[in-house]
Amino acid sequence: MKQRNTTMLLLLFLIAVWGINWPLSKIALSYAPPLLFAGIRTVIGGLLLVAVALPRRGKLQFAKLWPVYLSSALLSIVLYYGFQTVGLRYLPSGLFSAIVFLQPVLLGIFAWIWLGESMYALKLFGLLLGFAGVAALSIGGLTGSLSPAGVGLALASALSWALGTVYTKRNAQRVDMLWLTAMQILIGGVILLGAGSAVERWSDITWSPAFIANTLFIALFVIALGWMIYFKLINEGEAGKVGAFTFLIPLVSIGSSVVLLGEHITPNLVVGMLLIVFSIVLVNVNIGRQTGQARRRTTH
């Protein structure tokens, strides 16, 4: 019971900080170009995690494990944030985020194929219902014609995030999870910062107290603690189950956007909330049922 309560608290923290990240990032982008901002916040988050991991420096094994660190950085950080940053130029943010949060559906399917996690009709239906809820929340952001490039970049962002999560789970026994999280964020941040330096200008950054506070908050809570908790949960539980809860992130994002950016609540919000709640219930209740059935089979 204690472990379950801890897991739920970690999930709630993750949903809260990753949800508020969207409006905070939108505010920060009024002070800095996108790639440089992405690189700065990610490098800071990576350095914070490296400082935490230093007492366990013997578990780093960089010479042996650098391919794992680099591959994870490319999938979970560089491609995910890169496609996301560029793609937001082509689609409204609401619609873009709805497509990105196809990730839990992809993660549930990939975890079934590559991680051996259970998959059955109601679980898949629950995952699809969650995506429908996210789409309902964000459909109001759709204006004008769809951009094929924007849709493709959003799908690529969701795909890279799902593949990065599965890759991390598959390699969890080979590496120290704290070092994997720290190195993938630091390496990914350095790559993003290099790309930003090549195509953007540092002189375009306004180093105001608001921007600095915003960036430090995101670096510490969203990136450093957020990714560490996410991979801890993925490593200790079913990836598909954890992924299903991420459907709540756009809900928090919309709520915090109403408060911070003055955006309006629409009927889509109510419909989306109901669909998301039903999605999480379907995925998690059936996981418990399957576990109970498996236990009964082993005792008879």
Image: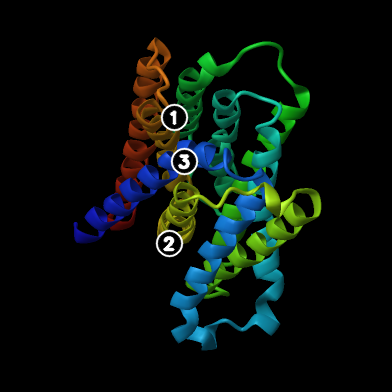
> Of the residues tagged 3 and 2, which is closer to the observer?
3
Q: Dot 1 corresponds to which residue? A: 126
Looking at this view, is 207 or 245 the one in front? Answer: 207
Labels 2 and 1 touching (C-beta < 8 A) = no
Residue type pointed to by label 2: Lys
Would residue 54 appear left or right of 159 to someone viewing this image?
A: left
Q: Mark 2 or mark 1, which has the lower sequence index?
A: 1
Q: Dot 2 corresponds to which residue? A: 232
Quadrant in the picture for the N terminus: bottom left
Q: CA distance from mark 1 to mark 3?
A: 30 Å
Quadrant in the picture for the C terminus: bottom left
Question: Which mark, residue 24?
Answer: 3
Please, what secondary structure does the residue beneath circle 3 have?
A: helix
Looking at this view, is 130 or 220 the one in front? Answer: 220
Q: Mark 3 or mark 2, which has the lower sequence index?
A: 3
Q: Residue at x 59, y 39 (%)?
A: 106
* Residue 101 lies in quadrant: top right
Q: Is residue 260 above or below residue 205?
A: above
Q: CA distance from mark 2 to mark 1?
A: 23 Å
Q: Residue at x 42, y 37 (%)?
A: 249
Q: Residues within 10 Å of mark 2 (few under 14, many from 20)?
A: some
Q: Residue at x 70, y 83 (%)?
A: 63
Residue type pointed to by label 1: Gly
Farthest residue to the right: give it. 198
- Residue 146 at what x, y percent from top left? 71, 17
Would residue 199 appear left or right of 3 to someone viewing this image?
A: right
> Of the residues tagged 2 and 1, which is closer to the observer?
2
Q: Is residue 3 above or below residue 79?
A: below
Question: Which mark, residue 70?
Answer: none
- Residue 88 at what x, y percent from top left? 65, 32
Please, what secondary structure does the residue beneath circle 1 have?
A: helix
User: Is any part of residue 158 visible from this angle?
Assistant: yes
